Image: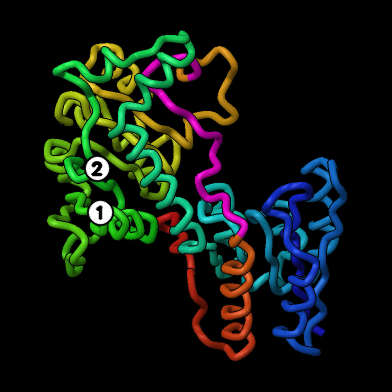
Amino acid sequence: MKKAVVNLSLPDTIWSHPESLITDIREVFGEAWDVLCVPVKPGQPRSDTVALAAQSADGAEVYFGWGIPGAVIDAASGSLRWAHTAATGVGSSVTSDFVASGAILTNSRGIHNEPMADWVLTALGYCARGFHQAAVARREQLWAYEKLTRADTPIRELVDLRVGIVGFGGIGQAVARRCAALGIEVRAIRRHPDKPTPKDVVWIGGKDEIIDLAMNSNALVLALPYTNETKAIVSDDVLRALPNGSYVLNVSRGALLDHAALRENLDNGHLGGCVLDVVEKEPLLSDHWLWKHPKVFLTPHVSAVTPRFWERELSLLEENIGRYVRGDRLKNIVNLEAGY
């Protein structure tokens, strides 16, 4: 009998799968498969979970988890054919050992598009309506009417934003749809700019045109995967190319943004502010400058949170299990060389 191991429970969080998920997965695999669920108890250390997963993975052909631990790859050596991560990012999963295993890796690309695009739209409104300044005034218990109504007020209408999206995959496209519906001008860059330009954007360029993107944007949204090629892609040169008073929003990975350059451009008045869901090292250290900077608003890597996650994830899993059993090509196959 073929074996599949499911390790998708993160207790006491929105990421812990419903009990019905295992039953649904077993039904799609069929009677020829032994589907094992890794038992996880509330408060159980991550290291214990990995050890249990590795014990279950001996002889497994399929593994579903939040990332693919090295111990699982070792335990399933010679048998693993398909691994799926419920996350979108695959940096920690694409190791030399995994590549050597010859297994296919799929991820949950697309599952998080809608909630993350909602986060971006919310952040755009926060920036455009002067909430950075209002938050500072609230902490200082100041009624900032004069500050927010003076001639050079930073408050603007959403329609006056020019949004530049760095990375035009599923998240970037979902952001563009929302912006276009509100009359916001959108530009973007992506790895393959020669693809047809969607109606929601006025211009799409390649990653080597990021300076041009910045020069024509007053709100820059980071929505691309982190790879060796994209590390610190938003550099000091990019930030300085933005018009004065612009905003930076990062919904992807902290390492895409040069944080030292960000601080300099916030401090010298060039940038109007930033909203970050991700930072270079998480969790953010208690003495980090980002906590108290008046032009910074932070959320703790929660832009993808939604109670609708599991209905989308289960739909993807059921589709791919059916394809795998039939011998068809899977959806969301990760390009191991590109890293996404």
Disc 1, disc 2: CB below 8 Å? yes
Q: In this view of the protein, can residue 96 be seen by the observer?
A: no
Q: Quarter of the image for the C terminus: give it.
A: bottom left
Dot 2 amino acid type? Leu
- The magenta-colored residue range is 291-307
207, 264: nearer the viewer: 264
In this view of the protein, which residue sits in the foreground, 285 or 68? 285
Q: Which residue bears the numbered disc 2?
A: 158
- In this rendering, position of residue 130 left or right of residue 72: left
Tag 2 or tag 1, which sits nearer the N-term?
A: 2
Quadrant hosting residue 30: bottom right
The main secondary structure of the magenta stretch is loop
**What is the spatial separation of the Cα atoms under label 1 and label 2, in whole angstroms?**
8 Å
**Quadrant in which residue 162 is drawn:** top left
Looking at the picture, which amino acid does disc 1 mark?
A: Leu
Depth check: give the residue in front, 313 or 50: 313
The residue that appears at 39% across and 13% down in the rendered structure is 143
Residue 200, magenta (yes or no): no
